[in-house]
Amino acid sequence: MTSPGELERTLRENLRGEVDFGAAARALTTMDASNYRRVPVGVVRPRDAGDVAAALRICAEAGVPVVPRGGGTSIAGQATGTGVVLDLTRHMNALVSLDPAARTAVVQPGLVLDRLREAARPYGLTFGPDPSTHSRCTLGGMIGNNACGAHSVAWGTTADNVAELAVTAYGGASYRLGTGWAGAPQGLRELVAGNLAVLRTGMAGGFSRRISGYGGLDALLPERGVEVARAFCGSEGTLGVVTEAVVRLVDAPRAPALAVLGYADESAAADAAAGLLGHGPLTVEGMAADLVGAAPGLPRGGGWLFVEMPDEGAARLLVRAGDAVDSVVVTDPAAQRALWRIREDAAGTATRMPDGGMAWPGWEDCAVPPARLGAYLREFRALLARHGLRGTPYGHFGEGCVHVRIDFDLASGAGIARFRSFSTDLADLVVSHGGSLSGEHGDGQARAELLPRMYGPEVIRLFGAYKDVWDPAGGMNPGVLVRPDRLDENLRFAVLPPTPFAGEVARCVGVAKCRSDAAAGPEVMCPSYRVTGEERHSTRGRARLLHEMLAGEVLTGGWRSPEVAQALDLCLACKGCLSDCPVGVDMASYKAEFLHRHWAGRLRPLSHYTLGGLPAWLRLIAALRLAPFANAAARRLPVPGLARERPLPPLAAEPFTRWWRRAAGEAAAPQGPLRPGPLPGSLPSPLPGPAPAASGVTLWPDTFTEYLSPRTGRAAVRVLRDAGLAVSLPPKGVCCGLTYLSTGRLDRARAVLRRTLDAVGDVRGPVTVLEPSCAAALRTDLPALLPDDPRAERLAAAVRTFAETLEEYAPQWRPPRLDRPAVGQTHCHQHAVLGDAADRRLRERAGLGGELSGGCCGLAGNFGFEPGHHEVSVACAEEQLLPALRAAPPGAAVLADGFSCRTQIAQLAQLPDGSRARHLAELLAEAL
C-alpha cells in the first residue's frame, strides 16, 4: 500500500493542479451537507481532464479510493470520502461554449449553475433543473445526484437535460457517453442484454422522481433508445468522474406569474397539487405554517402551494381551478423573489425548531407518486409522532417529493438507535406508497443501506454488477450507494465534545449559501470568500475547521490550531452570516471565542492592543488634549502593529461630549442612571420649537462618534430636537466593548460592559446609538456576554437606531425633503442584527431615492487596519460598494451610517467635487 507521502509526491510530479495533503485541506472536506463525516487522505484540484485521468490512474495504482466533489452541498454523504477528494470547483469551472441556435451548452463539472443561467439569459434560455442551492451547486454535482429543483414539473431532472458526458473512470480510462453503445465501457452492453427482464420488471412502475439507486438504469433498454449518458446521471461519483458535459437549454418564461394558493393545512395542499398539473405549471411547491410562520405576502391558510405559471392570465385561470381557501397572484419580480427566498432558504430554516432546537437531514427528499402525496404526508406525520420526533415537511408537491429536517439526537446511543429504527420504518412507508427513498438528492450513505426494501434482490445485484463494469477495482466513492456503509456509521457528531461551543459549531449543516460566488441582492455573507474563492474563507469552511479542531483527529493543535487561526484571520466579523446563513451561524462570535482562547496566557499581536484598546487610547488622548499631536505623529510615523498601506483617520479636535458640555453646560450631561432629560437651549445652532421632556431619548456617545466623527453626533442632536425629542447623554465612560470583542479579549469586554451597566443603572426610555456596529454589540453581544445580569437585557432592549428612534418616538415628524438619489452601503452589522426597514422608510419620506448596495465595505473596524489585510479589504470594497459609487447619478448623496464605511469610501473612492459620505443624520441636519 502506497503511503500518503509517496502518493502526494507522485501526484505533484504528474499533475498541473494543486495537490494538498495538509491538515487544513483534509479538514475542510471531511463533511458535506449531510450528517456524515469521513476523513480523506488528501485533496487534489485538477486543472483539466488530463489531470483527472492522471489522478485516477495514480490513485488506482496506489489502491487509494477517489471521491469527486463539487459544491459539497450533498445531503446524503456522497461528497465525503476516505481517499483522495477531487475538488472540481477550483479550476474546472468554465462554460466552454453556448450555442443558442442548438439550445445547448458545453460545461465543465465545477461550473456553478447560476453562471450557466446568467450566460443563457440574454438568449431567452435557461437550464431547466434548478435546485434551491443554484447559487453555489455545480453542474457536475447536479449530474452526480440527478438534481431536479422546483421547475422539474415542466423541464424534468438533470438526466432529462443532459445530451453527452465525457467521463474518466478509476484507472484513467476515458469515455464519451451519449445515446447508443458507442463510447460505453466494455461489458456494459452485455450486462444489459443479460438482464432485460430485470430491467423491465424490477424497475417498472417508476415515476419522475425515482432517483434512488441507479434509478436511470432502465434508460439502457433498447426500447428507451440506449441512453448511456442518461443512465450515468445519478451515480453519485461511484462510476467515474464527469470532466465535461453537453447540456440542453430550454426557453425561459418571459413574464412568469406566481400564484400562491392557501389551504386549510399541508395535507389539503398536497391533495390539491396533483390536480393542478394539467394546467401546465412551471412549479408546484408546497409548504406549511410550521415552516414559514407568518411570512408576509402569503394568503390565508395553514398550508400553501407556490405555483408558477408562464404568465398572469394562466395564473388567474389556475387560481379559479385551485379550490383554495385564499389566493394571491404575484407578478412583480421583486415580490416573487421575496416569496421564493422563503422556499430556497427552507433547507436551513427547517433545521431550526420553534423552541430553538436543531433538526437534521437524513430523510431529506423521499418522493411518492403525486396522487399519493396527501395520504403519505398524513401517515408521515403520524410516524414522526410515534417515534417522538419532530420535523417540518415541504417540497416539490407537484412531483410528490418531500423535504424534511428531523430533530434526531445523533450524539447519544439511544438517539442513534431511534434514528435507525425510524429510518427503517419510514423506508417501508415510502415503499408502501410506491415511492422512492430519494427524490433528487441521492442515497449516499443515508439511505443506500435500505435500497433492498425498495428494489428487491435481483435489482440490487444488477446495481452491483453495473458498478463493477465501470469500476471493477471498487475505487470510486466506496461505501456509497452500492455495498454501502451502515446509515448510522460515520456520523459527524460523534467526534465532538459535549460543550455549548461544539453545539454552536455543529449547527452549520453545510448548505453553503456562504459559497455563493456572486452578490445575491442585499446580502453580505461571505465577503472574504467572494474575494478569495477559497473554502477556508467561507463561513462553512471556518465552521468545518472549528469542528475538526474540537474533534482533534485531523487538526491536533486544539485552541492553538494554526490552521483555524489562519482561516479566521480573514474573517471580517461582519456578522453577515448571522442573518444570511439559513441556520444563523455566527462566525463573528465564534472568532471572538477562538481568539480569546487562542491567545490566553500569551502575548497578543500588537494590533490587539492598539486597535483592540482603541476606546481607552482615545479617551487618554482626549483627556490630555493631545489630538493635534497624535494626528501629526500618525501622519509622519507608522503606528506599531498596523498596516502601513492605510492612513489613520484623524482625531477630532473636540470630542462630541466636550462639545455637548461646552454648548449646554455641565447640567446637560446627567451623571446618574439613564433618564432622558431636556436639552438646554443654549446650543449654537437654532433649535426650533420646545421639546417636551416626556419625549426624551438618550444619545449614546460611541467611541467613533465621540472621538472621530463628532459632527455625526451634533447632527443627530439637531434632527432629534427638530423632531420634538429631548436629548440627554449617559454618564462618562460608557462603552459597548466592540473593539475588545473583535480582537477576542472577552474578559476585558465583560469588564468594560459591567462598568458600563454600573454607570447607566436602570435604563428608562430609548437609547439611540448612531454607530451600527456599536448598536449591534449592545443589542446582541452584551446580553450574550453577561447572561446573568438582567440589566444587560434591559439595555439591549432599549437600543434603537437613529431611524428607529424617529419612527417610534416622533411618528408625526416630517423630515426635510432632499429629493435626490442616494448611493452607498447599508452597514453589515445593521443588515445582520438591527435591520434597515426603518431607515428605508425614513429615506423614502425624505425623498432619498435608490437602493444602497449590499456586501461589506471591507474595512470592518480593525480588520482593514491590521497587517496583511489591506489587499482583501480593498477587494471587498470593489465587490459591490465602489462599483455602486462609480455608477452613481450626478448629484447623488453618498450615504454610509458606519464610520468604517465612511472611512473606506474616503480613502478609496474618488467622489466628485470633494464630497464625502455622510450618516443619514448629517444629511437631514444639513437640510434643516
Image (cartoon, rainbow, N blue to C red):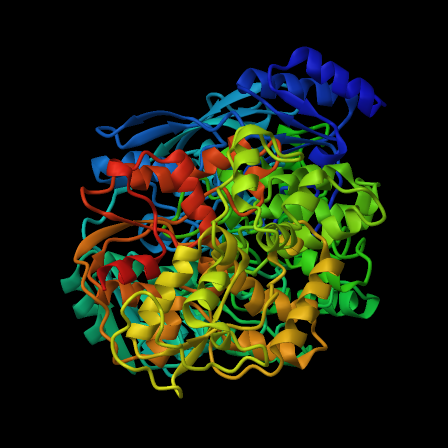
Q: Is residue 582 left or right of residue 848?
A: right
Place of residue 136 in the rendered image (x, y in percent of width and height, measured from the top left): 47, 43
Q: Position of residue 348 (x, y in %)?
A: 53, 60
Picture quadrant where residue 447 is located: bottom right
User: In terms of image quadrants, where is residue 119?
Assistant: top left
Which quadrant, please, contains the N terminus?
top right
Residue 425 in sight here: no
Residue at the spot 34% in from the left edge and 55% down from the top edge:
153
For this rendering, which residue is in front, 544 or 815?
Answer: 815
Total of numbered circles in the picture?
A: 0
Would you place residue 299 above or below residue 660 in this image? Answer: below
Judge whether residue 814 can be spotted in this image. yes
- The one nearer the camera, 886 or 111, is 886
Could you say where residue 295 lies in the image, as x and y percent from the top left?
39, 73
Q: In front here: 134 or 244?
A: 134
- In this picture, is 618 found above or below 507? above
Q: Which residue lies at the image location 47% right of the left edge and 78% below the top edge?
A: 766
Residue drawn at point x = 78 percent, y = 67 percent: 417
Which image quadrant: the C terminus?
A: bottom left
User: Is residue 374 placed above or below 483 in the rendered structure?
Assistant: below
- On the picture, is 606 further left or further right than 894? right
Q: Residue at x 72, y 22 (%)?
A: 60
